[in-house]
């Protein structure tokens, strides 16, 4: 680019000519490049690169102008030309230096741009790979959902396994897919399902092969050799190379009753699934395909587990339904038996009480006649035996109602002190005959009045005291009653008894101590078992029905108490103790407490001469016996054998009507018809039911229809005397049953 001012020698004219032409073309090329740069600058929107291109274009233009000016240097030029050339070269030098300095700063930016470009290209490629992976995962997920839907569409385990092989073969284009299940011994794997073979031959391979251990040791799909025993499912096709084979374990969850080909169960926790790609192809297993196989294996395990659980649930449901059916049949049979027993007891109760009524009534009538001492002794023996038989009947019926839960306590206000005194009065004659002393001690703090079932409490005390007298030959019997204190509940003999007291309640503790025959401690638990008697000779000789203490225990339990017996052995006596819960009456309402009528055993020679009584009973013997008792008491008795006859003969003169409501006569309807006949209450006779039923329903029905009283068969002369006396005095009498 330097200017040559030396005049060329004359011999170099041709060389000069070529230089001249070269400078011209160089200048032409330099001027064409800026035109191209100008076009690029117009198309570029990047700054400062646009400014750099403008500088570079100016540099080239100046360089081109310099070479163009050189065209005039080949001849002698003037001073003006030299000045122009000098100016152009100076400008060219300035622009060249500025461009060089600017490029020093621009080149790192250009390099960083190139680096960012490469980074962005790598990122784009990575995003492309991630998008491909996402698409692959979505495809895999779609296949998994499709396979899972097909697998879960049934809960039959064999269908699940067969569907799995078919769907995997179709989705992955497999040549073969097989499932190896463990045998009953757990030492071998048996070929159970295949994709192409309809009926697997049932090959077996040892379960401890290295390849099987390798697969069972991981939950991932493992590539295995096509020549291993579990992969040789089909003969290889000559020249074709076998395809790649993978195997994956299938957990057997909750399959303790899994049965295939008469296998009673599986002892291994894994099955083996083998999948083969088509032979003779260059296809290889992709990562997403292996993941698909692993997920499907887990889904198969879950589906098999659900199927097994469902089958167990259905089996348990069937067993439960069968058991419920058996229980329902047993319940119906038990209810039928209970109804039959209750019906039988009801009938037998009436049928037994009716002849007992005749025996006791006639014996009591006979007792009031003039008899020789021997005859009186025989009559008294008959009455005692009859009363014992009635007691046995009552005990059997009470025990039956206690066991079926139909017996309920009849709570009312009663005189607690009178109950103990009445028990002593009843037992004292027997104790006097045996020359036994009978003492009663009531604690000063024992309430006079209490709320509870007076009859059941008296029956309990009477049974316990009666046993003490029965098993004592000499000495005496003592009865102690007091309010139980809190510290007494800590007795080791009642460990399971937990007292619960509310306001206005207390626990009554009764101790009955005798000097009788005693009992072996090992025999004490049998005392409260029905129909059970001890092996003591004295106890066996004393007789008894084995029901008294059993009933006492149930009565005490109903009264939320506890009963036990202590004895140091044979010949050392016994102490019977029981605790029952009773209520305390409100003193403000004590005067309003309902009066409890009692049938006293002896009312003296009360005479009811002229008292008109109507007696209704369809049983001729019972009718005759009851009439005899009433006539003996001085009553004017009219009898009737049917409700129509009773309605026909009843009149205003009759003061009392006795009717047997358990004899098959519609006695309850008859009561309503009598009420309709006598509209005025003062003109209507007192209506009393004479019944052999001891259930509470009978009493409630009698009250509901408007009867004035109820007494229980059998009835002696003394009892009938007390009934009439109480009835005429209070005009109401309901014996507790």
Image (cartoon, rainbow, N blue to C red):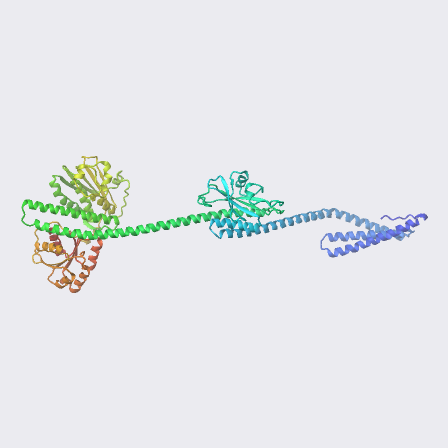
Relative image position of residue 360 (x, y in whole percent): 12, 50
Relative image position of residue 424 (x, y in whole percent): 15, 44
Relative image position of residue 425 (x, y in whole percent): 13, 45
Residue 442 appears in view: no
Residue in the foreground of this view, choosing between 426 and 24: 426
The quadrant holding residue 373 is top left
Residue in the foreground of this view, choosing between 269 and 601: 269
Residue in the foreground of this view, choosing between 3 and 23: 23
Relative image position of residue 314 (x, y in whole percent): 41, 50
Q: Residue at x 9, y 51 (%)?
A: 365
Residue in the foreground of this view, choosing between 674 and 344: 344
Residue 231 appears in view: yes
Q: Residue at x 18, y 39 (%)?
A: 540
List the single residue furthest toward the right.
10
Counting labels gives 0
């Amino acid at each position: 680019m330097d200017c040559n001012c030396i005049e060329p020698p004359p011999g170099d004219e041709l060389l000069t000519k070529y230089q001249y032409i070269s400078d011209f073309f160089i200048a032409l090329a330099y001027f064409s490049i800026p035109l191209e740069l100008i076009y690029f600058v117009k198309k570029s929107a990047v700054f400062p690169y646009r400014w750099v291109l403008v500088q570079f274009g100016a540099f080239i233009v100046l360089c081109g102008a310099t070479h163009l000016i050189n065209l005039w240097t080949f001849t002698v030029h003037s001073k003006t030309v030299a000045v122009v050339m000098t100016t152009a070269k100076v400008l060219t030098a300035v622009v060249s230096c500025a461009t060089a300095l600017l490029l020093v700063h621009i080149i790192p930016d250009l390099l960083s741009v190139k680096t960012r470009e490469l980074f962005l290209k790598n990122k784009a490629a990575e995003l492309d790979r991630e998008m491909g992976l996402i698409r692959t995962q979505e495809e895999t997920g779609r296949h998994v959902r499709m396979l899972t839907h097909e697998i879960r569409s049934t809960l039959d385990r064999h269908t699940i396994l067969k569907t799995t092989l078919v769907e995997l073969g179709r989705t992955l284009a497999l040549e073969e897919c097989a499932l190896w299940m463990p045998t009953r011994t757990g030492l071998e794997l048996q070929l159970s399902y295949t994709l192409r073979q309809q009926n697997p031959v049932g090959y077996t391979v040892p379960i401890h092969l290295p390849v099987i251990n390798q697969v069972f040791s991981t939950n991932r799909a493992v590539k295995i050799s096509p020549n291993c025993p579990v992969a040789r499912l089909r003969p290889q096709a000559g020249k074709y190379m076998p395809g790649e084979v993978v195997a994956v374990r299938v957990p057997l969850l909750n399959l303790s009753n899994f049965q295939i080909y008469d296998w009673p169960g599986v002892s291994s926790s894994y099955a083996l699934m083998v999948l083969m790609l088509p032979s003779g192809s260059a296809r290889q297993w992709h990562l997403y395909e292996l993941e698909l196989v692993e997920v499907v294996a887990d889904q198969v395990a879950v589906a098999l587990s659900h199927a097994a659980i469902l089958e167990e649930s259905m089996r348990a449901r069937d067993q439960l339904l069968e058991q419920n059916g058996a229980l329902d049949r047993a319940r119906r049979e038990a209810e039928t038996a209970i109804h039959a027993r209750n019906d039988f007891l009801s009938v037998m109760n009436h049928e037994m009480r009716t002849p007992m009524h005749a025996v006791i009534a006639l014996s009591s009538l006979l007792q009031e006649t003039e008899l020789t001492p021997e005859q009186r002794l025989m009559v008294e023996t008959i009455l005692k035996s009859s009363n014992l038989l009635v007691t046995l009947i009552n005990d059997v019926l009470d025990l039956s109602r206690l066991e079926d839960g139909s017996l309920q306590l009849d709570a009312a206000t009663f005189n607690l002190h009178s109950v103990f005194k009445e028990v002593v009065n009843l037992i004292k004659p027997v104790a006097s005959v045996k020359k036994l002393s009978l003492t009663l001690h009531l604690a000063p703090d024992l309430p006079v009045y209490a709320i509870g079932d007076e009859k059941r409490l008296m029956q309990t005390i009477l049974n316990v005291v009666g046993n003490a007298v029965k098993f004592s030959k000499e000495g005496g019997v003592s009865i102690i009653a007091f309010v139980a204190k809190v510290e007494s509940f800590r007795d080791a003999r009642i460990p399971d008894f937990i007292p619960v007291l509310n306001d206005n309640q207390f626990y009554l503790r009764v101790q009955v101590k005798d000097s009788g025959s005693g009992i072996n401690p090992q025999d004490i638990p049998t005392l409260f078992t029905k129909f059970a008697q001890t092996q003591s000779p004295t106890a066996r000789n004393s007789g008894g029905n084995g029901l008294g203490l059993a009933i006492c225990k149930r009565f005490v339990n109903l009264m939320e108490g506890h009963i036990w017996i202590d004895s140091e052995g044979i010949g050392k006596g016994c102490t019977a103790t029981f605790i029952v819960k009773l209520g305390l009456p409100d003193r403000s309402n004590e005067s309003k407490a309902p009066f409890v009528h009692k049938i006293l055993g002896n009312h003296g020679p009360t005479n009811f001469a002229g008292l008109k009584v109507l007696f209704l009973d369809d049983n001729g013997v019972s009718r005759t016996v009851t009439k005899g008792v009433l006539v003996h008491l001085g009553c004017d008795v009219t009898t009737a054998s049917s409700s129509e006859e009773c309605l026909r003969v009843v009149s205003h003169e009759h003061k009392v009507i006795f009717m047997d409501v358990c004899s098959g006569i519609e006695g309850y309807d008859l009561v309503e018809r009598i009420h309709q006949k006598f509209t005025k209450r003062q003109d209507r006779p007192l209506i009393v039911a004479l019944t052999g039923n001891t259930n509470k329903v009978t009493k409630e029905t009698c009250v509901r229809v408007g009867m004035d009283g109820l007494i229980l068969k059998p009835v002696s002369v003394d009892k009938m005397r007390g009934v009439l006396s109480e009835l005429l005095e209070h005009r109401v009498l309901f014996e507790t049953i």
